[in-house]
Amino acid sequence: MTPDTYRQAGALFDRLRELPDKELAPALDATCAGNAELRAQVMRLIEADRSAGGRFLEGRAVEDAARLLVLETPALPATGTMIGNYRLVARIGAGGMGVVYEGRDVRLDRPVAVKILPQTFAAGANERIQRFQREARAVSTLNHPHIVSIFDADFNQGYHYIAMEYVEGKTLRQLAGAQARPLDSQTILDWVGQTASALSAAHEAGIVHRDIKPENIMIRPDGFVKVLDFGLAKLREPVNGAANAPDFRTRPGNLAGTIQYLSPEQIQGETAGPRSDLFSLGVVAYELATGVRPFDGPTDGAVFNAILSRTPPPPSIVRPSLGTELDNLILRALEKDPELRFQTAGDLRSSCRRVTRDYIANAIERERETGQQHPSVPAVTAIPAKPARSRRSRPLVAVAGLAAAVGAVFLWLTRPLPPPRVTRIVQITNDRRPKQSFVNDGTRLYYAAGMRTPTSKYSRSAPKVESRYRCPSSPVCSRSTFHRTTPSCCSGSTQRVTPKTPTPFGWRLPWEARRGAWAT
Amino acid sequence: MLQAWRDGDASVLERLTPIVYAELHRIARRNLAGEREGHVLQPTALVNEAFVRLLGEAPVEWASRAHFFGFSARLMRQILIDIARAQDTGKRGHRSPHLGLSAAGDLPASQSDLVDLIDLDRALNDLALLDARQAKLVELRYFGGLENAELAAVLGISEPTVVRDWRVARAWLYDRLQSAKERAASAP
């Protein structure tokens, strides 16, 4: 074929390829005008185009080459194979650190999980294998309910394997995929707290996880957390450890799979410490809370850059329905500087518990307050139920209707304010900010801080403190009191709600009432 | 640097090969784990990285973007073909996927999905004799990872022309690879 024929065939192919079959042949005859070679060539192109489908060469060469590579790696053991004392029953998962089988310990007759390590480990130096044994031995000494126990680690039938406790449940990654609706903050706090508890025990034993990510945190059906693969990530790093670390940054092969959970210090090639695990757990918590990863990007470089320099928005901004109680906790775990994070996993765990406690206390209070709401509205609407029959009764009905309407409006305007929603948690002690007008009603503390008080003209005519602050459903503040300035109202000792515009006469403006008054 | 490489200085190739190889392993592991998401390093990024490592911090001064893209794509093609050849040694004609793995992983169901890079390399050389621009286009797109808009800019043609040329070249290459496969199958 000559370049000329090729060019002509290409042009015809482009013109004719979308014709239906029965029009194709006549069109070819007409355009090729007896040039049999050209006609055959166009036909070949059209047929090839159709059978090539949408995938041929549409990916990138790198990916196709990688697929060829996978096919060349040695086969994994088939199910039923015996490795050591373990019979492989079924393949249950795979990750950068190997393939996991459900197995059975035939000697003790109990279920186990058997992880077959990738062949790249076996191919490594002797030192690597020794290190693997050493690491596995260290991890096997960990005995903690939230840590998946290691029973055995050895080399058998050509495979390096680890036998460990079989856990029924799903990893956070699987759960996140299956979950129809997002998790509530209590569940997140519970899971993060349990994970922190596992980390705490490991850190005390001198073992850093290094690879905390949703794939390594399992949740049993009863909500019990089990953390997998302690210390194994260390095996992926260069044998000489920190000395080779800068290399690890530039060699993509060493960053198997997930990089979004690495801490800034890990990316910079420093040794991962206990606080690196807390950062990674923070990333997991953020993702659980919002459904998005705090540090992400289209390329590895963009992800690294985000981890090193980007401060993610608070989770409650990303998912407003979440509430703000998790913000401080998660953002603190995500501090770039390890010194500013939680210092120990124990710290993080107790923070989780404290936030949970406050959250529950608030929920109970909210419930109590909403329970006290006026039952007036249904009563009013019930009045005009009976239709008037005679003409004489019409004015009466009109008056009654008007009265009912006025009554309804009055009740609507004066009904209790909705319970405050926590918009932000602030520390009010030792923050070096002057507070004004402290009022205590027994269960709450009210104060004004950080605002120009008193600013409105109403404040001068209302000198008494209790008339300037209105507290929801409080026994001390009467219903006629209202806020005339813009004070902060604290419930418990650390929560604050910000009221809306001041209004005279203790009434809220209708539009305010509708959007929830001063709960913002 | 480019000149140096042309002159037979294989150091660029040598330096780049391990990086590409590591990236291939990373993608392969990811595929094995059934992970669909994740990042694939752009060929241009790989090449750029190789140069940065080769020359220290100094970024390479390229005559033009087009020049750099063209060079990256050619380098990438060379490396991948070399790797494919190394894998292929002595196994030509009877390469078969390991069943254990295909059953285990989320891998392409059959070998027919896979492009034989060595055959493709030959077919591309033949295509270059018929239509040099199209061969260049395939190299830049498939090996270099360029998008249509970039291709149009680099080749100095319009985007519709890129799309049209691509479609023709792809059909021709497919036809070529199919007949190569058939020949291999019928050979003893």
Image (tube, coloured by chain):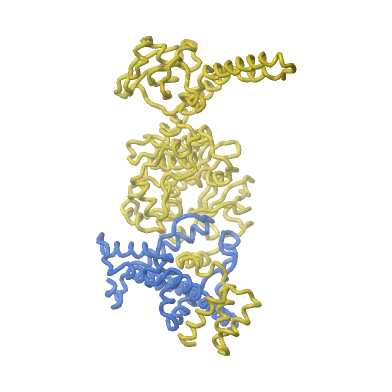
Q: Residue at x 55, y 83 (%)?
A: A41
Chain colored yellow: A
The part of the image, by quadrant, that contains residue B17 is: bottom left
Q: Position of residue B93 (x, y in %)?
A: 55, 78
Q: Residue furthest front?
A: A391
Q: Position of residue A313 (x, y in %)?
A: 40, 40
Which residue is at 48% across, 34% downward? A193
Q: How many marks?
A: 0
In this rendering, is residue A268 above or below A48? above
* Residue A434 in the figure: left or right of residue B76: left
**Which residue is nearer to you in this view: B143 or A217?**
B143
Residue A375 visible, this angle: no
In which quadrant will I find the C terminus of chain A?
A: top left
Residue closer to the observer: A410 or A359: A410
In the displayed structure, B16 sits above or below A146; it is below
Residue B88, compared with residue B20, is above or below; it is: below
Which chain is drawn using blue? B
Residue in front for this viewpoint, A494 or A86: A494
Q: Position of residue B161 (x, y in %)?
A: 45, 72
Give the camera-side residue of A163 and B117: B117
Give residue A426's position: percent from left, percent from top.
Answer: 38, 26
Q: Is residue A245 visible to us here?
A: yes
Identified at 45% across, 83% down, the residue is: B130
